Amino acid sequence: MTDDEVLAEFRASHALLEGHFQLSSGRHSAHYLQCARVLMNPERAGRLARALCHKLPREIRAQIEKVVSPAMGGVIIGHELGRALDVDAVFLERPTGTFELRRGFEVKAGEKVLLVEDVVTTGLSSREAIKAIEGAGGEVLAAAALVDRTAGEVDLGVPFFPLVEINFPTYAADELPADLAAIPLEKPGSRKA
């Protein structure tokens, strides 16, 4: 899929929102990508996952034994990428603020893992998830995401393969442009900053 085709999927599902949003990173933006909306249609989710799968180099795809995603945002795309790769897909949760495997999920010692996210904004959640996977004994080969909001600037410590890169400007709370500050603030993500 081309970048324009990916963005068309977001627009068709009303997943590309405009307004004043506080991202899970705490930064503010005039744009928000609601991946849950783009993934609510199983056929579309599968199509995006297959496209993301094709972004992974063949030598990495061949080694992946499990897909691990952070809950909530990464669960659906992680599951669909697991289907595309024909491997199990599990997810991490933060019951006490730190990622951990629950529900009987496990990563075996040395198991080759692909970390899958919906959106990477700063990379903080991805790095925390990688740390949890490695702490459980897994080896993170690479990370993948539907959207990289860092314009290719993020360093996750492993190869990173986004389906699309988008660089909407973000702002700290004390540096908001006047036009953005005038719009009521929304916090649409699953994690409150």
Image (cartoon, helix red, strand yellow):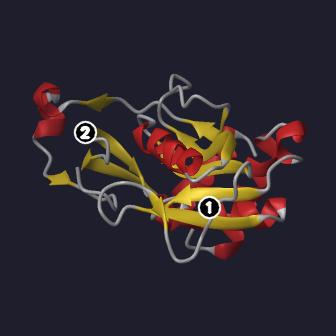
Residue to which mark 1 is pinned: 77
Relative image position of residue 159 (x, y in whole percent): 67, 31
- Depth order, front residue of 59/95: 95
User: Residue 54 versus residue 155: which sits nearer the camera?
Assistant: 155
- In the image, what residue occupies the spot 34% across and 66% down? 95
Vertical order, 144 against 65 (above or below): above
Q: Earlier in the sequence, mark 2 or mark 1?
A: 2
The local secondary structure at tag 1 comes to: helix
Q: Can residue 14 be seen here?
A: no
Q: Secondary structure at mark 2?
A: strand
Type of amino acid under label 2: His
Q: Residue visible at 24% across and 56% down?
A: 192
- Residue behind mark 2: 28
Q: Residues within 10 Å of mark 1 (few under 14, many from 20)?
A: many
Residue depicted at x 56% and y 61%:
12
Does residue 112 appear to the left or right of 178 in the view shown?
A: right
Q: CA distance from mark 2 to mark 1?
A: 25 Å
Residue 99 screen position, x and y as percent: 42, 56
Q: Amino acid at mark 1?
A: Ile
Can you see residue 79? Answer: yes
Q: x, y (%) of residue 150?
A: 47, 29
Q: Is residue 65 left or right of residue 192?
A: right
Image label count: 2
